[in-house]
Image: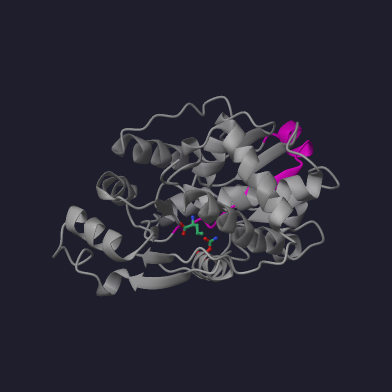
Amino acid sequence: MKHFIDISNLSKERLIGILNASIQNKNENISKEKLYKVIGLFFEKNSTRTRLSFELAINQLGSSSIFISSKDSHFSKGKESVEDTAKTFALYLDALVMRVNNHSTLSSFVKSSSIPIINGLSDLSHPCQTLAGLMTLIEEKGSLENLNLLWMGPITNVAHSWIEAHKLKIGFNLNIFCPEVYINKYQNKLQSYDLETDINNIVHYKIDNDILNSADAILTDTWKSMGEETDDNHLDKLDNFSVTEELFNKAKKDCLFMHCLPASRGQEVEDKVIDGPNSKIWVEAKNRLFVQRQLLKELL
Ligand code: CP
Ligand code: NVA
């Protein structure tokens, strides 16, 4: 693996390997390794967790990071081509983490880059988040075997990475409760990137109580992703897809709540759920550090 753009870049074995190594390394004392590398963080969108966890992971590995805001780069102003920008980055950097508006920017960089590119979120996927979510599930539930995961709401970039992990058949079942309009939006987005995915058998336009009752973890995301136009009429369609206390109580007693964050409290989730005893949001956020540290070790 040269770059890490999507979960689908990984084989089942490699994915499990990264997760196991991340869990193993979680509590190790990180002695600064001699391998000194310089990693760039090029961000076109805001971030709290991704930037912090990558910067910390890089520091713990004895390497250093340079943050490049898209506001300051010639590339984002359209003054320099992808090819020339990618070649310039490779002169100074050993790897590049990118948070981009359009997934196609990642694909273009991958074509022109001689250094590893890591996807720190695009409009289409957020694979580092799914790695951290999977690690959290293994830690909390012992394994992914036969876990029933339930995604609530729009099929966002984060949801897409969960779908890709599901396609690797690593043990968990996935169901998605999402209004039809948001499924269409997602399918249109995939088509614009010339990608196909078969989700018909896991998507449900309405809440199905049998599926809800057997959920081991309920996952959701903001209804308004960064940079996405949201029609208020569409938002109304999401009312029944909020993870309220009432809905959450219909799942298994030990069902976990997970969210990539940032959350719009009171919209996709109620305080009583996100702050409740079954919520694992902080474990998941902290696990970003461990999976990304492992990923950097494998790519550098
Ligand atoms: N979950 C996540 O990627 O958070 P940030 O947008 O804060 O980086
Ligand atoms: N779907 C969200 C995820 C944020 C981590 C967004 O793209 O804004």
- Counting every numbered tag in the picture gives 0
Q: Can residue 234 be found in the magenta stretch?
A: no
Residue 246 pos. (x, y %): 77, 52
Which residue is nearer to you in this view: 172 or 11? 11
Residue 100 pos. (x, y %): 35, 57
Placement of 100 over or under 204, stated as above or below: below
**Residue at the (23%, 57%) spot, across then down:** 87
Q: Quadrant of residue 57?
A: bottom right
**Residue at the (48%, 26%) spot, across then down:** 198
Q: Is residue 206 at least partly visible in the picture?
A: no
Q: Residue furthest left?
A: 79
Residue 170 pos. (x, y %): 65, 32
Q: Is residue 66 at least partly visible in the picture?
A: yes
Residue 69 pos. (x, y %): 33, 72
Q: Can residue 224 be found in the magenta stretch?
A: yes
Snapshot colouring: one colour
Which residue is nearer to you in this view: 294 or 139? 294
Q: Which residues are magenta?
A: 208-225
Placement of 64 over or under 186, stated as above or below: below
* Left or right of 108, for residue 26: right
* Left or right of 23, for residue 278: right
Q: Quadrant of the N terminus?
A: top left
Q: Residue furthest bottom?
A: 72
**Residue at the (19%, 68%) spot, across then down:** 74
Q: Residue furthest front?
A: 34
